[in-house]
Image (cartoon, grey):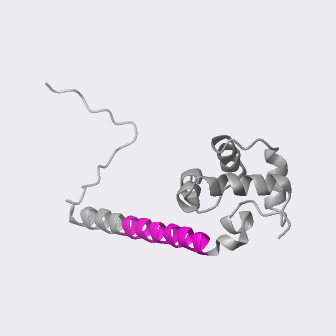
């Protein structure tokens, strides 16, 4: 695969960390398994990338996508990419299950609560104060 210098440098900096998957997770601020432009800019600073970040983004997202995956950085990182994607999917499933449980719990609590008696308010009526 022929890569532009900026993309090659970024890939090499990522690889030089020793653990691409862990580094990618650390750089992925919102935890979706992908880097968006703002995340890439922060990642470049953390990795001490010396090139033009906008050009790097254009090189790595040549298809016009709005997010960057590990496969776009290096297609040979399929196993690492799949592991990260699997973790993201599991976190999402756990989060959805938690939200579902919270909704059911809230519903159950609401159903067990004492019914609230409606108060009838007559327009213009002002109760007098009685000590």
- Image quadrant of residue 47? top right
Magenta span: chief secondary structure: helix
Query: Which residue is pictured at 71% across the width and 57% down the height?
Result: 11
Q: In which quarter of the image is the N terminus?
A: bottom right
Measured from the top left, where is residue 107 in percent x and y? 31, 66
Give yes or no for residue 113 being in the magenta stretch.
Answer: no
Above/below status of 82 relative to 124: below
Q: In this view, does 8 lie to the left or right of 38?
A: right
Query: Which residue is pictured at 75% across the width and 59% down the height?
Result: 66
Measured from the top left, where is residue 75 in percent x and y? 72, 72
Measured from the top left, where is residue 46 in percent x and y? 63, 42
Total tally of numbered discs in the picture: 0
Query: Which residue is pictured at 24% across the width and 28% down the height?
Result: 128
- Between 106 and 36, the residue placed more toward the observer is 36
- Between 64 and 118, the residue placed more toward the observer is 64
Q: Is residue 33 left or right of residue 57?
A: left
- Between 65 and 52, the residue placed more toward the observer is 52
- Magenta-highlighted residues: 79-100
Above/below status of 122 relative to 74: above
Measured from the top left, where is residue 63 in percent x and y? 83, 67
> Most extreme residue toward the left, as rendered?
131
- Between 94 and 77, the residue placed more toward the observer is 77
Q: Is residue 19 left or right of residue 101?
A: right
Q: In which quarter of the image is the C terminus?
A: top left
- Image quadrant of residue 18? bottom right
Query: Which residue is pictured at 26% across the width and 67% down the height?
Result: 108
- Image quadrant of residue 80? bottom right
């Amino acid at each position: 695969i022929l890569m532009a210098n900026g993309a090659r440098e970024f890939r090499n900096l990522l690889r030089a960390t020793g653990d691409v998957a862990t580094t990618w997770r650390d750089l992925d601020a919102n935890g979706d398994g992908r880097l968006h432009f703002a995340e890439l800019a922060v990642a470049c600073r953390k990795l001490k990338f010396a090139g033009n970040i906008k050009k790097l983004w254009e090189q790595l997202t040549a298809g016009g996508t709005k997010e960057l995956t590990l496969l776009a950085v290096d297609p040979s990182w399929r196993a690492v990419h799949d592991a990260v994607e699997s973790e993201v999917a599991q976190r999402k499933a756990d989060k959805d299950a938690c939200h579902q449980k919270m909704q059911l719990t809230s519903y159950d609590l609401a159903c067990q609560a004492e019914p609230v008696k409606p108060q009838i308010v007559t327009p213009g009526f002002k109760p007098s104060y009685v000590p």
